[in-house]
Amino acid sequence: MPPRNPIRRFSNLVSLKLSASKPIEQPAPSAEGTRTLAQFLSTSREKYLNDIRAEPHKGAEWTVVMGNEAGDLDSLASSVAFAWLQSEIYKKPTIPLLQLERDDIDLRAENIHALHLAGITKPKEELLYLTDVKGFSPFPSQNFALVDHNRLGALYTAANPSAKIIAVLDHHEDEGLYKDTASPRTIEPSGSCASHVAALCPPELPADLATLLLTAILIDTNGLKPGGKALATDIYAAGFLASRSTFASKLPGKLVTALLDDPKAGPGPNALYEASAIRELTATLVAKKGGVSHLSGRDLLRRDYKDYQYVVDGKTVRAGLASVPVPLKAWGKGGKFEEAAVAWMRERELVVLGVLTSFRDSDTFGGSGKGKHRREQAWLVYDAPAEGKEKAADGEAVNVEKLAARLWNGLEDNVELKLKKHKKFDFEKGDNLPSGAKGRGYNQKNVNATRKVTAPVLKNIFEVPEPAATPEKN
Ligand SMILES: [Mn+2]
């Protein structure tokens, strides 16, 4: 049986049972009814935004389906698939909402890769984000479906008394909510929530959608590795999806035939895990997930970032600590680090920024066989003028010289961090810092000290009146 045309609508579809492995009679695809998953998503987004902006608005006609706030591939794929299922099969307009800001989609390269494989090549334009619904209070819709979590966020219930959960599909611990309103309400263990969503999909789901769900299962189960996180539900769902996905042509023909025939009994539990196309896809997804080479300097700073506030000599000083998994040299030459760091300080209105790197040095080899674990710290002190202003108003200005001196002394004297001046990053030598800014770079000889150690050191430096007492271990 050849893979079917992925882009059909299912207006005549009545039975949706997954067990109905026999092909359901399909109408010939009409030009009007033919659209890709990407088209489905961008059309839904446009319609939804029009409806909630209309007067009177029509947000009540929609169901909003969300994954959890971490925004991983499982949440993404599960919400997209559930929206497709509800809209295209059950004819209930449903829009997937990503619980993240539009720009944050770039922070997960594996998601971007999986979306591309599913034909969604402009996810910033094709998907709906928190950014799009920010201006609406209360939230403009009342019907919600939850995937990959099972408690509705406060944002959606605030001043929205008719908020109702119409469906829950999840694999986290069941909080016991929405039993009277949610149908289906499937909260059961599985490697991936995408497997629960796949179990509801008809055999004729679009190949693009099958691919997207499959990528989520593979990343959550490490490619269906035996003895790992994959449960029978995941193995079955992955077989069902793989044989209908855009990867079907790369799998052995016999395997595809067996899977199309009966994904449960068909080829045996490890057949898919052993297929080279599945191994390659898993390896790519895992590498993308672990890699940060696609991130911009700003992304590296905001990816794992915390804000702090101190009162130094009666003035409020905002400080930020960014933990970064690559060395300072990863920013590249020619002042790129300084440029990104200063821009971030302006954006967050910081006077102090510490960039704490942690990485394996590929030039040396430690006992583990991997490169030696190293840490660096780079610090900038700069009282950036607020946007639109030339410089900070008199009286508000922080004495950068004094603050920097205090910071350098405190850091360099600290017995726990063991900081040594960085030979390659002496920020005051070059002319890459704006005038009035101070900066120093260090190698951190205590490679076990994380931000959890550095943050209290910083607090101690700034908030213990000078002369700073020698920091004590506690
Ligand atoms: Mn999940």
Image (cartoon, grey):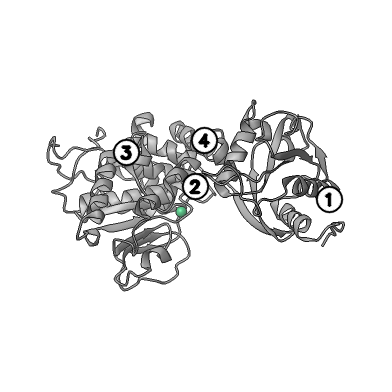
Q: What residue is drawn where x is 25% and y is 46%?
A: 46
Q: Which residue position is annotated with label 2?
A: 221
Kind of residue sitting beneath label 4:
Ala
| Image location (x, y in percent) of residue 79 | 36, 52
Q: Nearer the viewer, mark 4 or mark 3?
A: 3
Spatial separation of the CA atoms under disc 2 and disc 1 = 43 Å
Question: In this rendering, would 220 be left or right of 116?
Answer: right
Drawn side of residue 245 relative to residue 215, left or right: left
The mark nearer the N terminus, 4 or 3, is: 3
Which numbered disc flags the more N-terminal residue, 3 or 2? Answer: 3
Label 1, on which residue?
Answer: 414
Image quadrant occupied by the C terminus: bottom right
The kind of residue tagged 2 is Thr
Of marks 2 and 4, which one's residue comes earlier in the chain? 2
Q: Quadrant of residue 338?
A: top right
CB under 8 Å between discs 2 and 4: no
Quick check: marks 4 and 1 in contact, CB under 8 Å? no
Residue assigned mark 4: 283
Mark 1 within 8 Å of ligand 1, using the beta carbon: no
Task: Specify the amino acid type for callout 1.
Answer: Asn
The earlier-in-sequence mark between 4 and 1 is 4
Furthest-front residue in this view = 394
| SS under mark 1 | loop
Q: Is residue 377 above or below residue 416?
A: above
Q: Give the residue type that dot 3 points to.
A: Asp
Q: Please name which of the two marks, 3 or 1, marks the residue nearer to the observer.
A: 1
Q: Secondary structure at mark 4?
A: helix
Residue at x 61%, y 50% (from the top left corner): 393
